[in-house]
Image (cartoon, helix red, strand yellow):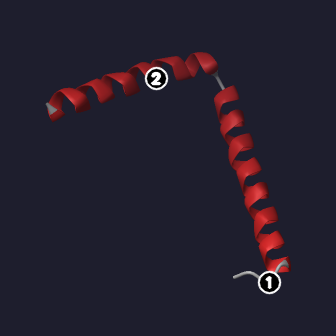
Amino acid sequence: MLRNFFEGLGDLFQATFKILPIAGDSVNTLFMLVIGGGLVYWVLQMRKHKANGEA
């Protein structure tokens, strides 16, 4: 049962890797924007907590 699950998961990943060259560099740009946006949000939230005197 687990073998079928992991083989299916492997097939899914292999199909994903075939799609990535078609998408080109836009995938990397999207990841950078999402991670950068999350970092900015996190820093702003931490500053707000520090201003309120929270730990």
Q: Quadrant of residue 5?
A: top left
Residue shown at the point (77%, 56%) measured from the top left? 41
Tag nearer the camera, 2 or 1: 1
Judge the density around disc 2: few (<14), some (14-19), many (≥20) Cα neighbours within 10 Å. few
Q: Quadrant of the C terminus?
A: bottom right
| Residue on which the image places disc 2 | 16
Residue 53 is labelled as: 1
x, y percentage for residue 32?
70, 43
Residue shown at the point (70%, 27%) measured from the top left? 26
Q: Secondary structure at mark 2?
A: helix
Q: Secondary structure at mark 1?
A: loop
48 up-or-down from 24: above or below: below
Residue 2 is labelled as: none
User: If you read the primary sequence from the N terminus, does the residue marked by circle 2 or circle 1 appear first?
Assistant: 2
Residue shown at the point (16%, 31%) measured from the top left? 3
x, y percentage for residue 36?
74, 50
Give whichever of 50, 35 is nearer the camera. 50
Q: Quadrant of the N terminus?
A: top left
Amino acid bearing label 2:
Thr
Give whichever of 7, 20 is nearer the camera. 7
19 up-or-down from 38: above or below: above
Give whichever of 51, 35 is nearer the camera. 51
Residue shown at the point (71%, 51%) measured from the top left? 38
Tally of numbered tags: 2
x, y percentage for residue 23?
62, 20
Left or right: residue 15 versus residue 7 is: right
| Marks 2,1: beta carbons within 8 A | no
Amino acid bearing label 1:
Gly
